[in-house]
Image: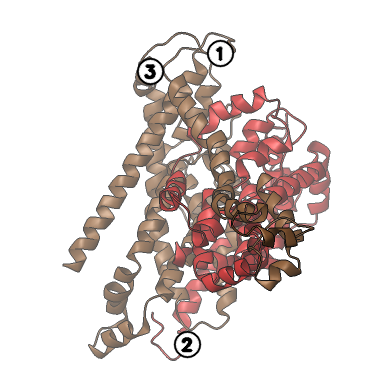
Chain colours: A brown, B red
Amino acid sequence: MSDHAPATVGGTGRTSTSRSGQAPPAGVPSPDHRDMRRTPARLTLRQRLSRWDMKVSPYLYVLPFFLVFLVIGLYPMVYTGYLSFFSWPRFGAGHGPWVGWENYSHVLKDPVFHKAFWNTIGIFMLSSVPQVIVATVVAALLDTNLRGRTWWRMSVLLPFVVAPAAAALIFGALFADKSGLVNDVLSGIGLPTVQWHANRPASWLAIATMVNWRWTGYNALIILAAMQAIPRDLYEAASIDGASRVKQFLFVTLPSIRPTMIFVIITSTIGGLQIFTEPRLFDTNLQHQGGSSYEYQTLTMYVFNTANSSTNPYPRAAAAAWILFLIIVAFALVNFAITRAVQKRSHA
Amino acid sequence: MTRTSRTGPGFLVYGLLAAFFVGSAFPLYWSFVIGSVTRQRAGENPPPLTPGGHFFENAARVFDRIDFWSALANSVIVSGVSAFSVVLFSTLAGYSFAKLRFRGANAAMVFVILTMAVPTQLALIPLLKEFSNLGLTGTHAAVILPWLVTAFGVFFMRQYLVDAIPDELIDAARVDGCSMIRTFWTVAVPAARPAMAILGLFTFMQVWTDFMWPLLVLQGSDVQTLQTALDQLKIAPGQGLSDMALLQAGTILATVPLLLLFIATGRQLVAGIMQGAVKG
């Protein structure tokens, strides 16, 4: 708490001297300030402290963030990279000899990793695309002269207060293979029931549904905020030109909210590719491997499970974590490039 | 579709929004239904659609199997301390970035934003080892430490404070003889208060709902949060998965505290999300 030290210094230093304006702006309590006036040429302790305060404080205030990031972000990240090139002896407390890219090639050749990769992509696609579309529609619905505006806005945010762990238990029950409500409705209307935990695409859909349930309203509010920032005269001009409401939405609203859409898409990419809690708790067996034959094991679950495996646990998990990071960066960049390209084309 | 319309929207808009709300609320309602019927009824076909009268029985069974109250207290502690810490340090840093001039400020701010894109998994394994070497696993501190200050918090406060404080106010305080930190307390904090409340609320909810990190660092210890306690409820030998009534009663019990918070502060939460969006 060293950055708090000047508070007491300045606090007690605010005597009549400092208010008179003759004394330097801040400093220590000085019992004999008359002394300072006798030697105006030399910097007093108070002046020096004040200068030091001005110079150092901005850095001190941002320091906690960088310290925390160093300890819980940067150092572990670099160490993960380092570790991924070593072996790990059985029951060892530290890493063994250097093995080069072996951990990476092991992970990349592992059929479970391949399954986890496609599971993650599948769940991500089923959650991000419908989510952004529905959120935009809900935002457009909210961007009207509603009665009880605040209430409606709150209502779309309701699922956000349900923790993913709780949501997973609720949806795990809704999508239960035998006595789940969804299957009951399906058979009630004469459709075949679905093995939500054993059928691979079906399990993706169930998990994506729970992600969409929790996040669509949240994203709708973000998009709504962007819609409300659109100047009204743009719409007036469009309606004078005879544009219908649908056309106004397509040619005024959508282009104006594009930066926010990019933001929503990129954040949902970063979050979506790291999905863990929902698939882990959707599991009905207690091995937590994401279904009896990895139907819905995701990449983050793979990292997690690898760290608990028997051979080379930490180095392999570290390699998998770095591969996951590179996949996320690649996806974010592709997303960014696509949205930029679309933006340029529609402006032309 | 747009705000140019003077008259209110038609039934279609209300109908669609109402349908969306039903979809949002139904899973919670259904969870309560299952949590309030007997264990047998919960497993029967067709599943129940209206609440029964056995919620308190099921809740009592939840209390038997997991230490619910201590998990609740732990969740309150870790979420509360984290929220306080994130607000304090993010406001300090955000103020510094927004209003104080120092060398390297822009580069440092870009760095803060970039750290938001780093996935937490990348740090997970060494961090866990680091914490277990320090003897932190199984403690509140282990859950709180990564949440002392967040990049999002710094960014959010910076965006808010850029416009919220006139520079003249800071200069005036300095001329008045205020030290830097005193200027922060007397000028920045009062102006930042609305954003601080929103950030605190938001962080509280984030830490409260977090699952993976507490699962890792609290594994096998007596200290559990509500979320990890729910996981234990599921794996309780012999019951768990086959006992839907128990699981859903636990889910509802774990959700009620945040639901109450939402009812009390939902308005601010909505405002905060929308504000963060426009400025972000």
Residue ID for mark 3:
A106
Name which residue lies at 41% across and 32% down.
A116
- Give the chain letter at badge 1: A
How many numbered marks are there?
A: 3
- Residue B96 sits in which quadrant? bottom right
Identify the residue at image location x=44%, y=37%.
A199
Name the front one of labels 1 and 2.
Answer: 1
State left or right for residue B94 relative to residue B142.
left
Q: Badge 1, how many Cα within 10 Å: few under 14, some, many 20+?
A: few
Q: Give the x, y percent position of residue A231.
A: 36, 80
Indicate the secondary structure of the residue bearing disc 2: loop
Return the chain for callout 2: B
Residue B8's disc number: 2
In the depicted structure, whether residue A164 falls above or below residue A22: above
3D distance between C-alphas at marks 1 and 2 = 67 Å
* Mark 3 and mark 2 on one chain: no
Question: How packed is label 2: few (under 14 Cα within 10 Å), some, or many (20 or more)?
Answer: few
Task: Tell me the mark number nearer the camera, choosing from 3 and 2.
Answer: 3
The quarter of the picture where the N terminus of chain A appears is: top right
Report the Cα–Cα distance between label 1 and label 3: 20 Å
Please tell me if label 1 and label 3 are on a single chain.
Answer: yes
Residue drawn where x is 18% and y is 62% of the image: A345
Callout 1, which amino acid? Gly
Q: Is residue B41 visible?
A: no
The circle on residue A94 is 1
The residue nearer to you, when weighing A186 against A129, is A129
**Residue A12 seen in this snapshot:** yes
